[in-house]
Amino acid sequence: MQTIALCEQELREADKAQVDLRMLLKGLREFTEVRELTPTIVNTLIRRIEVHNNDKYDGHCHVKVDIYFTAAGMLTLPTEKELEKLMAEIRQSPQQHRITA
């Protein structure tokens, strides 16, 4: 019985994640031409923002900010070199990297 209850709970969580992801995609489609960050956009796309203590190095003050997006959690953005490598791979074999939604 306990296994069934656990499986049912996992199924409910998976359904909720799927709905959250649909809401995120809907929000992204609505805001493709964002010129200004408004409270509506923030509330639709972002679950929470964590601002960490500042660090001083290189003569500058640096503050780490973590942004947790709705249904996606925190995204780690690729570096410029990683983006260039990915773009080169996509140009070489565009059929392998085709995205459908």
Image (tube, grey):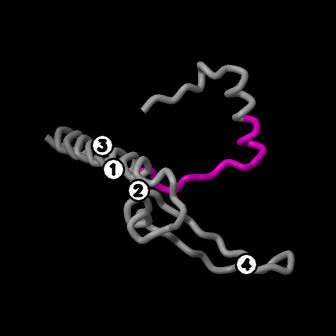
Of badges 4 and 1, nearer the viewer stands 1
Of badges 1 and 3, nearer the viewer stands 1
Q: Upstream in the sequence, badge 1 or badge 2?
A: 1
Q: 93 left or right of 47?
A: right
| Residue bearing mark 2 | 70
Does dot 3 land on a helix, a strand or a loop?
A: helix
| Residue bearing mark 1 | 23
- Which residue is located at x 73 percent, y 42 percent? 82
- Magenta residues? 71-85
Residue 14 is marked as: 3
Of badges 2 and 3, nearer the viewer stands 2
Q: Nearer the viewer, residue 10 or 38?
A: 38
C-alpha separation, residue under disc 2 versus residue under disc 4: 28 Å
For label 1, the crowd category at 10 Å Cα-Cα, with few meaning under 14, some 14 to 19 and many 20 or more, is: some
Does dot 2 land on a helix, a strand or a loop?
A: loop
* Residue situated furthest right in the rendering: 58
Q: Is residue 66 magenta?
A: no
C-alpha separation, residue under disc 2 versus residue under disc 3: 15 Å
C-alpha separation, residue under disc 1 versus residue under disc 2: 8 Å
- Which residue is located at x 75 percent, y 48 percent? 80
- Which residue is located at x 75 percent, y 35 percent? 85
CB within 8 Å, label 1 to label 3: no
Q: Upstream in the sequence, badge 3 or badge 4?
A: 3
* Residue situated furthest left in the rendering: 1
For label 4, the crowd category at 10 Å Cα-Cα, with few meaning under 14, some 14 to 19 and many 20 or more, is: few
| Residue bearing mark 4 | 55
C-alpha separation, residue under disc 3 versus residue under disc 4: 38 Å
Amino acid type at image mark 3: Ala
Q: Position of residue 41 (x, y in %)?
A: 42, 63
Residue 42 is marked as: none
Q: 91 left or right of 41?
A: right
Amino acid type at image mark 2: Thr
